[in-house]
Amino acid sequence: MREKIEKLREQIHNHNYRYYVLNDPLISDYQFDQLLHELQALEEAHPEWDDPNSPTHRVGSDVTREFRTVAHRFPMRSLGNTYSMDELREFDERVRKEVENPEYVCELKFDGTAISLTYEWGRLLRAVTRGDGVRGDDVTDNVRTIRSVPLQLQGADYPDFFEIRGEILMPYASFERLNREREEIGEAPFANPRNAAAGSLKQQSSAETARRELDCTLYALVGESLPFETHYESLEAARRWGFKVSDQVRLCRTMTQIEAFIAHWDHARYDLPFATDGVVVKVNRFGDQQQLGFTAKAPRWAVAYKFKAEEAETELLSVDFQVGRTGAITPVANLEPVSLAGTTVKRASLHNADQIALLDLHLHDRVYVEKGGEIIPKITGVDLAARPAESLPLQFITRCPECDTPLVRDEGEARHFCPNQNACPPQIVGRMVHFISRKAMNIEGLGEETVQLIYDAGLARDVADLYTLQREALLALPRLGEKSADNILESIARSLTVPFPRVLYALGIRFVGETTAKTLAEHFGSLDALRSASRETLLEATDVGVRIAESIQAFFADPLNRFRLDRLQQSGLQFETVAPAQLSAQLQGLRIVISGTFERHSRDQLKGLIEAHGGINQSAVASNTDFLLAGSGVGPSKLAKAEKLGIRRWTESDLEAAIAASPEMPNAATQAQSHGAESAQKEKSDQNNLTQGVLFE
Ligand code: IVH
């Protein structure tokens, strides 16, 4: 069994590598999940063979911790910066004074946060942040969740013990997603992917880091007696061992070659999926590096060339003030379209009132726009000489542009807010959009546009109205056919089974994101308990600080929120954590493996149903499995194994029938209960006839 576990781990490590490092998966996501579930089940059954580097630990845990500070074996230095070709030429001349015919390696300078990884016998031992360069924070558990970081190296020619350094990055796509989510719950968005990567790495819960979708690129092997002559060779070896090493690495012998590399990436970098802020030029031969040595702060054998942020000049035409779901006001500049870094820019973010004041913006100013690490460009300055004499300073609005309510700005908040949460249209619509989103109530068929239609037509003015929507009213909406209307209604009805933590998240309490909602649901167990919790009790929950506690109390203090909650409760939403096995004993003791996708329930819901009726949800088919609950796309290996072991197959309807069957009837559950597990096994064929089980041919 131990061999089987190790083989699975190796297989999964390899598939992870193909997917996250090579970008070339061999199997489907679904097949991958099957392997992972199989491993999870075996590990659950054999806790004695647990391994912190098992791929099952990639999902992280909710255990919170303090980070331990660790001294670096070799200090983590920074690089000297250069901003012009002249400065770079001076670097080359300094090198040539000490080294004959130097060879250089040109690399991209990744704009994330530095990390040092230590491997022992090919296994990840420790991951430490740069800190002050001498000591950093031990963030191993969080780094383990980053899929492109190998937990177990490939091949056999790696040193027994070594350190490798690189950059933890947040790709733009993840950055945008994270910021959208943060805006949704009223958290200030991260200014750029670098801050987001650094913040995500220092999360208290590694499950949260796992959600942040970080990436890691390695660029330097560190050690006393590395078996290589050159930096380039060491990068190639690291790539072979399974590390993600950039393909954009070039060997150069002349300044002309270095200049060409820089000129290329100065533009091509805008096509990369992550942020870069320059090029790093390193002396290639380790012998030469040693000869050149270090200054107090940086190596003499390497230097960074920083890209100039691309800038354009244009006219500020007007400013829009947008109202977000939480009422936060974001000023956005409308610009005379101008071409910048390969795209046409028409709008720029102005962030908040302070930013406008700092720039001293006037309408119709000539402004400079820059594309930094962010996708949305920003205004960095004003051409004062070009300012028209009669122009007026830009005024921040004092009333909400949507509902005319006077805006407020809380102490310490950079942003203005519209406090009219319950009647300001974009706030209501935004709240509904959040409520129906996939990670909240997951109401399919209802998108942002349809929600707006429903709102505009007056069919729903509050999330609670969704549960009283009438078919006829939906059909009267423009461009909405019968099928769509039925889909929406079915999906709304299905949302009644969404578990409490997600309902809590869906309510959109300020600062209560997905993770906090989960912790609160676990800690308090029900909405009533949370509602009546004192400030002190709230603060006792993991990760809940004063800001969250106050926001929760303010939420429940609002009579309109209380009214909405009462209505939602009457509609039948899950307002408490359902304790497993409380509904019935219809599946008592039955071991059921779920595989595939189902028409009426998600897999999580099925798992909940099985447990609520006394069954055991097994992750992998084993000889003691009672049923394989098979949906469409059932895993072929699970199917084959079930067939071999003579295990019966259940459909979604079989499960529903077994749960619904009256306790007086001699059905699967009662028999299993009265005869115990062993005899239940023997009587499987009888049971199946009663529960319309499908026999294998
Ligand atoms: S080499 C001894 N290579 O830039 C020098 N650093 O200012 C070791 N960085 O802290 C660094 N991309 O976080 C190196 N290709 C690259 C890099 C890189 C980004 C960062 C790194 C370092 C900082 C130096």
Image: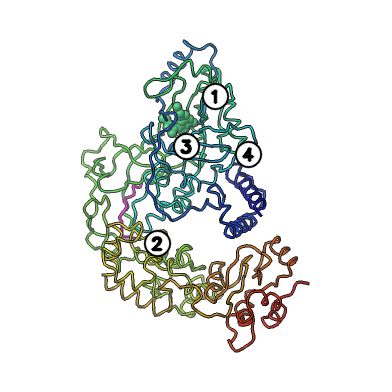
Image depth: mark 1 or mark 4 in front: 1
- 608 is within the stretch colored magenta: no
User: Please, what is the three-letter code of the amino acid marked with disc 2?
Assistant: Thr
Residue at 51% in and 67% down: 444
Overall secondary structure of the magenta section: strand
Q: Nearer the viewer, residue 427 or 215?
A: 215
Identify residue for label 4: 154
Calculate the distance from the C-alpha at mark 2 to the C-alpha at mark 3: 31 Å
Magenta extent: 326-334
First in sequence: mark 1 vs mark 4:
4
Please give the name of the residue rendered at 46% of the width and 23% of the height, measured from the top-left corner. 302
Q: Secondary structure at mark 1?
A: loop
Mark 3 or mark 2, which is nearer the start of the sequence? Answer: 3
Q: Give the mark nearer the N terminus: 3 vs 4.
A: 4
Residue that appears at 58% across and 87% down? 662
Q: Residues within 10 Å of mark 4 (few under 14, many from 20)?
A: many
Q: Please tell me whether mark 2 or mark 3 is closer to you in this view.
A: 2
Left or right? Give the position of 206 relative to 671.
left
Residue 519, numbered label: 2
Q: Between tags 3 and 1, which lies in front?
A: 1
Residue 241 screen position, x and y as percent: 61, 36
- Crowding at dot 2, Cα within 10 Å, few <14 / some 14-19 / many 20+, comes out as some
Find residue 225 and name its label: 1
Q: Which residue is mark 3?
A: 167
Disc 1 from disc 4: Cα separation: 20 Å
Check disc 3: other Cα within 10 Å, few if <14, some if 14-19, many if 20+.
Answer: many
262 over 652 or under it: above or below: above
Residue 363 image-quadrant placement = top left
| On-image quarter of the C terminus | bottom right
Upstream in sequence: badge 3 or badge 1: 3
